[in-house]
Amino acid sequence: MAPNGRQAAGPRCVAIVGPFQSGKTTLLEAILERTGAISRAGRVANGDSVGDASAQARAHGMSIEPNVATVDFMGETMTFVDCPGSMEFLHEMRNVTPVCDAAIVVCEADERKVPALEVILRELEEADIPRFLFINKIDVATQRVRETLALLQQASRTPLLLRQIPLWKDGIVRGFIDLALERAFIYREHAPSEIVEMPDGEDSREREARYAMLERLADYDDALMEELISEIEPPRDRVFDDLSRELKERHVVPALIGSAERGNGVTRLLKALRHEAPGLEETRTRLGLSEDGPPLAQVMKTQHMGQGGKLSLARILRGELHEGDTVLASRGTEARIGSLVTIVGTSTARVQEAKAGDTVGFGRLEGIATGDSFSSGKTRPDAIVSPAPPEPVYMLAIKVKDRKDDVRLSSALTKITEEDPSLIVETRPDMGEIRLLGQGEMHLRVAVEKLAARFQVGVEMMKPRVAYCETIRGPASARGRHRKQTGGHGQYGDVMLEIRPLPKGEGFLFEDRITGGVVPRQYIPSVETGVRDALKSGPLGFPLVDIAVTLTDGSYHTVDSSDAAFQAAAKLALAEALPKAKPVLLEPVLAAEIAIPTEALSKATGLVTARRGQILGYDSRPGWTGWDIISATIPEAEIGDLIIELRSVTAGVGTFSTHFDHLSELSGKPAEIVLHKAH
């Protein structure tokens, strides 16, 4: 029970999400100050905030991973997880929100950020997360709140429900009227707002706004609708019950106002969470979990803390877990809980046990990764929710600065990809490269910075090589004779090869047309081996494709012929034949689907055509009003920084997916540049 006698909903977990630079981390600071977790709110700009405390976050002035803080508010435990707002780090939110009871969506009256707000709200809608809207920076607002709400409604498929209206004085917002409480409040700097008498002239505004709120609630409550029609004032408790129920049923998104920087509107936001947000029981129901069963938890985030070891942030959804318990993960691995800690930013406090609803750090859960569930039961738990990593849109090649770090690089890459499943490491022996793939330039830069800061592995970043190939346009033939005499047995192999082009996509064909045993059967596989080896690098310096090689004639020596000799002869024959067969350069071309807001369609089209891309068609994006899909083919060599320019013309929200489509002949100046670099 809470101190006021109401039934507590158990420890809550609330995500703080929103577009980049909307004030999420500042709101977390204000919450920490208001709940007494810290004595004074820090400022992100000053580098003294509880959140964004890592060296990388401080250096770049942005959240790059979730900030976590557990507080006590009016006798109830709440854990807030502040998620990055940049599209490059949006995947962090996907692993956090499913096991949260609710989300606070921080936004502002900025038309440029509406597309990003839409993307974030869509993520929450599809994950079915109850959510509040916190309209931030109200202290610098210049337009009416209803205009702001209409602007923000464009981003939400669920109706936004205005819960508060601002009190203006001399063109500045000085406080607000709570439409459910029917009370006026005046803001105080970094302190709870003060209840005041309803200012003169505000009664009619309050009644109009309150009626609009009740009308929206009545859409889902027939009894309330009848009372409104009959002009009967509904009881206040009834209104709050409706607010809570319609939030939990995802009929509405309550919208509150405030200023995180000044600590305004924070207490009312916390009280709304306490009284109206769902608790653990509703979250379990949403996830399809029963209350009965062995203790169960879900990992939201993994961090390797250098010498501090591995820490897994997880929420306990059922039962109790203790330090020293052995747990079994959904992937089948077993681990022992090395420690349990509560978290406020970078500060931790050790505890011996954690109960259902708690969000805590688990020390040294080896073999258990972000997105895994784990249980202390005897049977392996099913995965509760495992969001698929987003498709990579940016790629770099990396190599260690110091060769002695080669072995450590492999271990460090394993750890950072365990922390962040959206990072992909790709080893390309054919290109002599290790590649790092992710969600953008900053995403990969931060990953490289972590390699240096946490694991002391310095790497260089470079543009990845393109897998160019070559083929031939015409037929040719040549004889290859390998003869070597060095005392004792010599070496002898002699072959006649014909080559011809194959249709696009056919690859490689080896044919044997030997008659009369001029090349013994046991040496024919050696000829093919030599051919395959020679085709790894043609006259232009790249692997050959779509080519047929026919063995038509040859000779051998009963003593000196060998497998190695016939392999060498095949290579000699091809080295002579290929330049005569009109070799041409081929480049890989990718099929791309590009998703952008409609207003950016012409600019995005220009980006594609400027990269030698071919537009195949346009279509509306299914389920996304005001968005389009461009279907195109783009050479792999041109795709490199497309995401950077695409985000620049789409307010940060444009994205794409690609897959290999075909190889295309490259000629003219572009081919000359490639060949010059290759040689």
Image (spheres, rainbow, N blue to C red):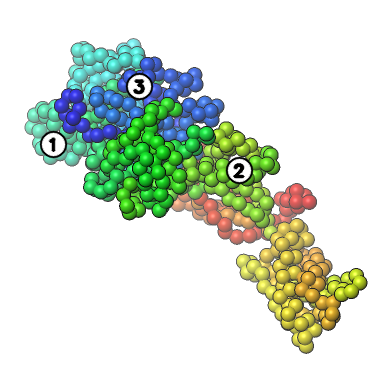
Who's the residue at 22% across and 14% down the image?
195
Residue 308 or 240: which is nearer the viewer?
A: 308
Spatial distance from mark 2 to mark 1, Cα to Cα? 65 Å
| Residue 313 shows in this picture | no
Who's the residue at 30% across and 30% down the image?
78
Quick one: quadrant of the N terminus? Answer: top left
What label does residue 37 carry, if any?
A: 3
In percent of width and height, residue 485 lies at 90, 72
Q: Residue tagged by mark 2?
A: 409
Spatial distance from mark 2 to mark 3, Cα to Cα? 39 Å
What label does residue 6 carry, if any?
A: none
For the image shown, how many numbered marks are present on the structure?
A: 3
Q: Residue tagged by mark 1?
A: 225
Extreme residue in the front direction: 324
Is residue 535 positioned above or below 244 on the image? below
Helix, strand or loop for disc 3: loop
**Displayed quadrant of residue 75:** top left
